[in-house]
Image (tube, rainbow, N blue to C red):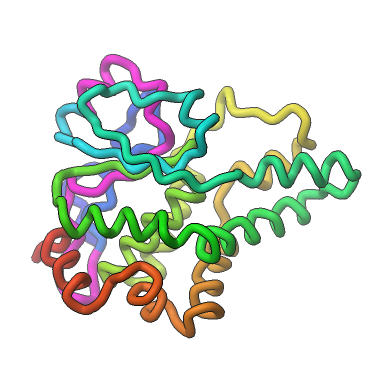
Amino acid sequence: MSDPQPRHLGLHGASNFRDLGGYPSRAGGHVRWRQLFRSNHLGQLTETDIAAVRGLGIRTAFDFRGRDERLAGVCALDEISVRSVPIEPSVVPALRARAAAGQLTAEAALDLMRESYRNYIRSYTPRFRALFDHLIQDDAPLVIHCTAGKDRTGVACALILKALDVPHEIILQDYLLTNELYRREGVAHPDLPLEVFQAIGTVQASFLEAAFDTMRDDFGDIDTYLGDGLGLDDPARAALRERYLTA
């Protein structure tokens, strides 16, 4: 794998901020460095973080958070244009409803996480399509994020890498990097059992596979989902690869 530049930026106020560059594509070449970034939210950046992000030349943020989430953490860089593409509600309200009914276990929480990933595809494909419309039209560096940068962001970035023909095992590897990088200090749901919070506070391969399985179930295969769901016909895919792959 081509890693001439650091993937993880090591920001203090956004621990999960990282570059999608360097991954090999079966179409030839590698994903360009310093063009596509993923992160947890950008509302707690330090002055040093802000200077580092400014140095990347990022002009656009695609924010998958809902309204209340956005109000809790506003982007700290005025020069970044924020595109709100909300995917809500998060899984937490469903967990609280199960807890109130006395039906919440760690395994039930994992099932709800997998179902939320299925719902990203069934109900929110237009949000992901808006992201791809932007990617095809504007190759300026951008960052994709939600609150933790792990679930909604994870699916969006997996779709980008899939459209760039990055092998599935590498897509999964990038997705699981969140478990190594994301710091959960200060993130708590005291009304949820600890074992449930621990279950939903990570990413698991079965979560992402639930999204890909839904693409297969609803569209026949992932390639058809990319075309019919995300509007990536052959010319669009060629344009995407021209912008974001390099030899």
Tell me if residue 36 can be seen.
Answer: yes
Tell me if residue 8 can be seen.
Answer: no
In which image quadrant can residue 39 be found?
top left
Closer-to-camera residue (223/247):
223
Work out whether 121 lies above or below 149. below
At x 49%, y 58%, the residue is 124
- Residue 56 at x, y = what percent? 17, 34
In which image quadrant can residue 108 be found?
bottom right
Q: Residue furthest right?
A: 102
In magenta stretch: residue 157: no
At x 50%, y 48%, the residue is 87
At x 27%, y 23%, the residue is 77
Q: Is residue 114 left or right of residue 14?
A: right
In magenta stretch: residue 33: yes
Which quadrant, please, contains the N terminus? bottom left
Closer-to-camera residue (130/198):
130
Which quadrant, please, contains the C terminus? bottom left
The segment highlighted magenta reads: 24-53
Q: Residue furthest bottom?
A: 220
